[in-house]
Amino acid sequence: MRKRQIRAVIKKDIKAVTSSFQLWLPMLLLPVVFSLLLPCLLILPAYKYDISERSILEVLNNLPPGELRETIFSFASTNQQMVYFSVHYLFAPFLLIIPLMAASVLGAGSFAREKERKTMESLLFAPISAPDLFRAKIFAAFIPAVLLTFFSFLLYGTTVNLAAYRLFGGLIFPRPHWLILLFWVSPALSLGAVFLNVFISARVKGFQEAYQLGAVTVLPLIALIAGQITGVLLLNNTVLWLLGAGLWLLDFFLIRRAGRYLDRNKLFATLAS
Amino acid sequence: MEKNNNAILILIYVTIIKMNFFPTRPVLLMRGEIMGKPVIIMEKVNKAFLPGVRVIDNLSFSVQKGEIIGILGPNGAGKTTTIRLLNGVLYPDTGRISVAGFDPVSAGDEVRKRCGVLTESAGLYEHMTARENLLFFAELYGVAEPVRQAERLLSEFGLADAARKKVGAFSTGMKKRLGIAKALLHDPDVLFLDEPTTGLDPEGSRDLLNYIKELNREYRVTILLATHLLKQVQDLGDRFLFLERGRLLESGTFVELEGKYLREITLQVETGLAVSGDEFAGFPVVKKAPGYLWFRLENKDAVPLLLEKILAVAPVYSAVITGRDLETIYFKIREEKR
């Protein structure tokens, strides 16, 4: 019964997203910018112009000895080195922003839109427990956010390989860290963002309030983590595994604790009368 | 001999069917219900949204299985809050509540499994079709055969043709009917209706009230109907609860309330009698109009005597006791209890 209820809410919410043009169009624009335009703008000029940047070359020269340093310096031209380093390391934070943005929009709308459309009371009158409703709302925002991330990575990889094929004479994407990032770190980060936005959404009256509050409190926090990813990637994959594990643990802890702060009475208290 | 036996068997069979020994839905006691024990109990319940401002003030009442209760009162009387408290959507500050033998706070889902609610706004998803709405709520309520149940209700409420249309395009009446269908998806034992006829045209209101009556008669569904449209519930309710500012001002059956509050009656008589003063044969005349007189009487027993006196001197075409309705009782109660 509980699984059936949770599944029903998830299905209903995902349908609401896919049937709302205004909701999914801005989210689809993000991958187009970060996964298509940005890599093209970096790679294509490298065929004709010198794109080397001093500060990045310094970072490359200071890389510790190892597989990455060897791979990068195996390329003859600085343009190749610049492109390889940028597409694999510098752009990683941008790709982490996609699930975060999606999580913010979807999470903020989860309860707030129910309140605005006066359907929240119908949910509260149904025999689904408040924690189950909360979990269902989290999954309903988390699943599309993760799918959008997968799509973005796929688009990014395809763009990079096609655009850089002639420059390198072969495929350069992905490196192993992308897979850890895609399947381990990024979902954990998305879940955290979804959780915080859904929690805010449950405690405020409308979508605008939820979105703004989410943007002020959640995004900078998560963006900070995302921004440090380049540095973490340069260390080694073990650190990436550990970062993901830490995030998953934090998500698990927060979701478990949230049940205490969300009962029907509290969910109802935020309903606009 | 065999023919006679068959005739007797057919007779017994027809009698059973006629007496409705096997109704389409078996009439069973609800879980937690003990014969004669109320289905709903509210005992000294208090609820405040702001400190010191009580929206429910020491409210106590009980409801027996199969009763239709009219919860009456002006806006802000606490009718909707009472429904929310009974369903565990709001928690009381103090007091005890029991619905179908369960506490709505500690066993809210058990209560909600047995209750159906029609909220004032119907609470439907406008971007979804009528059918999708019912199927979604059927899943939430754990309905065994969601598709069959949704289609049965859509057809029962005259929405079969609109089943695949988005609810956003529905009229208020259609939304209300779909809202009722939603509330009945899981065959609830208790039905809460909050202003069910708001936005409905007279025909829609009549159909809905008839359906409620039928539902109660056929399946013994206990019904709590919150409204401020007194005329609509007068014939429907078994008992009435009058609320004001969260307090229970009065409760009782129509007959009990009538006996308590309508101590005098007004008789409207269509007659050729002309009265010059303000009384006739000792009966005070309270109002006059061409062809009509209104008399104030102490009780119904005085009616034949008055009519006899009038008939002795003038014709009488009709006589109706006026002001004998729930609305008059409602205002009397508010006047006296304030």
Image: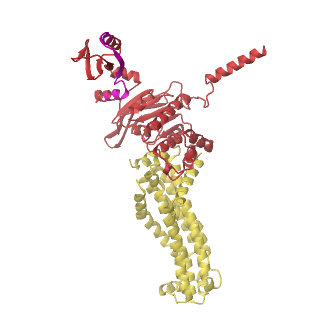
Taking the magenta stretch, the answer to whether it contains residue A121 is no
Magenta-tinted stretch: B309-331
The chain coloured yellow in the image: A
Query: Residue at the location (58% across, 51% down)?
Result: A7
Taking the magenta stretch, the answer to whether it contains residue B318 is yes
B303 vs A28, nearest the viewer: B303
Residue that extends furthest to the left in the rendered view of this protein: B277
Residue B101 in view in this figure: no
Q: How many marks?
A: 0
Q: Left or right: B3 with respect to A243?
A: right
A29 vs B171, nearest the viewer: B171
Residue B54 in view in this figure: yes
- Provide residue B114's location: percent of width, then percent of height: 53, 37
- Provide residue A56's location: percent of width, then percent of height: 50, 84
In this rendering, the answer to whether A185 lies above or below B77 is: below
- Provide residue B255's location: percent of width, then percent of height: 40, 21
Location of residue B275 (image quadrant): top left
Query: Residue at the location (26% across, 21% down)?
Result: B286
In this rendering, the answer to whether A90 lies above or below A77 is: above
**Quarter that holds the N terminus of chain A:** top right
Q: Left or right: B10 with respect to A237?
A: right
- Provide residue B290's location: percent of width, then percent of height: 28, 23
The chain coloured red in the image: B
Residue that extends furthest to the right in the rendered view of this protein: B2
Query: Residue at the location (65% across, 82% down)?
Result: A170
The colour mode here is by chain
